Amino acid sequence: MIPSAFTFYKPDNIEKAVSLMSDFGDEARVIAGGHSLIPVMKQRLTDIKHLIDLSGINEIKGIEITGNQISIGAMTTQVELINNEELFKKAPIIREASLQIADPQVRNLGTIGGNVANGDPANDMPGLMQLLDATYKLSGSNGVRDVKAREFYEGAYFTVREDDEILISISFDAPSGGYAYEKQKRKIGDYATAAAGVILKVENNMCSSASIALTNLSDTPVYCDKAVDIILGKEIDNNILNQVTEACVEQSDPVADQRGPVEFKKYVAGIVIKKALTRAIERT
Amino acid sequence: MDDVKTPSREERKSALSGLGTSRKRVEDARFTQGKGNYVDDIKLKGMLFGDFVRSPVAHARVKNIDTSAALALPGVHAVLTAADLEPLGLHWMPTLAGDKQMVLADGKVLFQGQEVAFVVGDDRYAVADGVSLVEVEYEELAVVTDPFKAELKDAPILREDIADQKEGAHGARRHPNHIFTWEAGEKEETNKVLEEAEVVADEMVYYHRTHPCPLETCGCVASMDKVNGKLTVWGTFQAPHAVRTVASLISSIPEHNIRIISPDIGGGFGNKVGVYPGYVCSIVASIVTGVPIKWVEDRMDNLMATAFARDYWMHGKISATKEGKITGLWCHTTADHGAFDACADPTKFPAGFMNICTGSYDIPVAYLAVDGVYTNKAPGGVAYRCSFRVTEASYFIERMIEVLAQKLGMDSAELRSKNFIKKEQFPYTSALGWEYDSGDYHQAWEKAMKSVNYKQLREDQAKQLQLFKDGKSRKLMGIGLSHFTEIVGAGPVKNCDILGLGMFDACEIRIHPTGSAIARLGTISQGQGHATTFAQILASEIGIPASDITLEEGDTDTAPYGLGTYGSRSTPVAGAATAMAGRKIRAKAQMIAAYLLEVHDDDLEWDVDRFSVKGAPEKFKTMKEIAFASYNQAIPGVEPGLEAVSYYDPPNMTYPNGAYVVVMEIDVDTGVSDIKQVYALDDCGTRINPMIIEGQVHGGLTEALAISMGQEIAYDEQGNVMTGTLMDFFIPTAWETPNYETDYTETPSPHHPIGAKGVGESPNVGGVSAFSNAVHDAFKPFGLTQAHMPHDHWRVWKIAKDLGLHS
Ligand SMILES: Cc1cc2nc3c(=O)[nH]c(=O)nc-3n(C[C@H](O)[C@H](O)[C@H](O)COP(=O)(O)OP(=O)(O)OC[C@H]3O[C@@H](n4cnc5c(N)ncnc54)[C@H](O)[C@@H]3O)c2cc1C
């Protein structure tokens, strides 16, 4: 459980960090909270020669809220997301989901940026960001660009982020309507067996807007566009909820692991999706 | 002048904090302040570190080991392979079970994680780099992980070293992958009873492979002093003296030149009984390099390579009359021992005390056979917080009782009650040959049923079932019962030894002139609180306050010889030695007091903390006064000083028992279970420290919860360990741990000097059955008879699915 040797850098601004990244290419890696990266390094599953610590860069920390616009610096920790009252008022689902991540020790160090940039399908925040239709701001040697969370993930640990790009912030509009993030896990500190987030609005018993996303049910987070199409404009009843649930499960593609076989995961996916839908509707 | 009132007898008694007192643990001050001294805290001058290159595959021939790149790395001092150990005869080592085990891969590897080479370097970092640079060429071989396939004709032969041996350490071997057949009881008679029985229940009960996973992993620091020829080893040893003797026998270093020290140990649970390649390699490396060597496992090493537990496939048949009187029990067990037979059992018991599998019941005839087989898995088979194979036995019988009850259409609480050994039958000789010392099972059972309001629970369960059937709920309620009898305190030297070392234990006491004392024992605490409880035993025996008695264990240069701490043997054996040594002190003290008071010995009586003259209690000498006198008076015919030592060979084992009830609610769709109630009644005989008992029960129940509900060492078909980290190996946190209600009855052991039986392991033994039975009970109305543990979400979900509850 000892990583191989690496050189350590702690730049104090994003330009320096980006330039280190472009100097070293795929031999370099940024470290945020380290709670996904360090375990992998300790098991020597990856060989990282240059480690660039982002914790000295203040410009990518903190939560900014202007009107309905929310922007969160990549180096904001999960515990900061939980404790920020303003954020809770605007987007309460962030707290609900964050509290279901890992345990307090991990959340004290783990960052939103690390969580979404990591590309691990088991991470909860990528699904959450797809749910919120968030935009990621990336800074690289070719400048700054925006990528939609729904277009960021290509496969397990593969994202559209270039080797020299650093995620600097995440922004989204405050959602409106009912919400829920449901997660089944084996114990505290475990990743999801299946998890689902739902945000929707019901007006005159009709669904006027909706978003649904899944965690750890495929090699990327799953934004359930087909299910959203089904529910939009429809009257909410049990029948439609079952159809929506089915459409979500259809879009999932989990793999077997110690949590259970695929058939089980799909079944549980159906249960958590239905629970999330029901709770979101109750909250509208 | 002040009228100094003599304290009353009760006041003097309570000042001692003796037996029955919830004395606070004296160990906790240092543990809670981070001041413990564990192996990894030991830092010696010039110390180097060692670590293993481990096999990534489960079965392969080792074609070549290239150490050159590792040796070229600055900071790496040496790389040991089997070839380096062979000239010393240390490339293999004897196991506790009469087999032998490779210290480092000798031509082949037999399980994933097996030790292949030992890299020694300046620090952990250099060593880790060195490990990654050792190049090993493997030629993979077919893998067997299923014990039922190990004995097939065309199964790959694992142990080529003994492939031709028809006789093993425990009798005939019928296949190269077969280790032993061990039998107990009456085969023919049992078969006959089963054939003629009115009702027979037949079931395969699997107790899966798991791991003790103590908080502190295994490790050691070996230091060979070449000037005086003395080897000192600090290590995580549950049996330091046995380690010393074994080390002397295999290294031919004279035993007086070996000093084994067990410092603070962060939990053992059987994991630290065995001898591991890490110890041998550290010792050899220290001899080779002349400096101390430290080796400490990481968590993955620990889970993957050192001592698993259980892995017993127990096929059972139990017969009864239509009225539910049990008439016979038959059991055939297939025991998966992994690549080497390294079970930690008394020598004559290759399947431990599995023959306690008649449990708490008066079963007239029984037969047990156990076949041990080799597979491509890690060796071990240790008693994970239980006496040797006692949890397996207890789980087996408690499942068989449930299956039989189902077959009879009878409430299993009633079936138990109908068949318990009766109070007046003790001492009771079981069909498989044990003499149960004492018990009052009916009293305990009735108390338990009353405390949980069993009738009401069954009514609540029926209501919940109706809601489920009416489609109003997706939850079922399960009530898990268990009554267990353990056999602990190994044990009588006449039938219990480890590698020829009789399993007695010892205590040595020295009373200081000012009336305080030190006591040393052959056992070693790993969190049990020996320094607290053994001082309490002594306080009551010799009238010196527990707080004035220092307890020391674990240093073979100072402690008397003993066989260590596991199998709940400390209180039954070393605790008895402590009481007996205390009595020797008291006997001498009586002579001294008689001299001081100028009366005859027989005219004195013991009174809490003093000897007083019969009929004249104002004439007395306190233990404190006697202690001082023993050092400053020339007493005719009495040696100076006040010391005693006792080596105690117990006449019998002790048989702790208890009644547990678990209530849970199970969501049939998610497989999630919600534990509503855990009630644990223990009868451990005389209760030394109720608070420590409660703590032990809480800890053991939490392990039982873990084992039954999710904890396992799982392998895939290629022999890869699937649960090698704590992400997948379930250790409950406070969040998953339910509330526990503890209770007791007190039936002293008739043969133990203070009547104590041991309790540390009871909750693991009784708990697993109770949790598992609750899961089974929830699905019983739908016909479930047996579903193997662990009952994690997906396996519970699968039960519901297979029973058609998901449509
Ligand atoms: C026991 C345990 C349980 C856990 N359970 C959960 C859980 O239930 N749900 C969950 O979502 N997570 C869980 N986690 C993961 C945890 O939330 C991590 O903290 C998070 O995934 C990564 O955040 P980090 O800040 O620690 O990132 P790091 O570990 O530092 O980095 C992760 C990866 O992202 C890259 N990276 C980090 N920041 C940036 C950036 N700004 N730009 C580009 N790349 C970047 C790194 O190079 C690295 O490849 C768990 C972790 C542990 C140890």
Image (cartoon, rainbow, N blue to C red):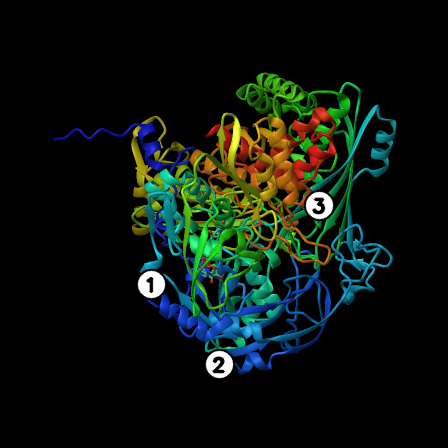
- How many neighbours does mark 3 have within 10 angstroms: few (below 14), some (14-19), or many (20 or more)? many
* Percent coordinates x, y for residue B85 in the rendering: 63, 75
Callout 3: helix, strand or loop? strand
User: Left or right: where does residue B343 sit relative to residue A146?
Assistant: right
The tag on residue B74 is 2
- According to the picture, the residue beneath numbered tag 3 turns out to be B312
In the image shown, does B148 or B420 lie closer to the viewer? Answer: B148
Amino acid on which disc 2 is placed: Pro
Q: Residue at x 62, y 46 (%)?
A: A259
Callout 1: helix, strand or loop? loop
Could you tell me which quadrant the N terminus of chain B lies in? top left
The answer to the question of whether label 2 and label 3 lie on touching residues, with beta carbons closer than 8 A, is no
Amino acid on which disc 1 is placed: Gly
Amino acid on which disc 3 is placed: Tyr
The tag on residue A56 is 1
Callout 2: helix, strand or loop? loop
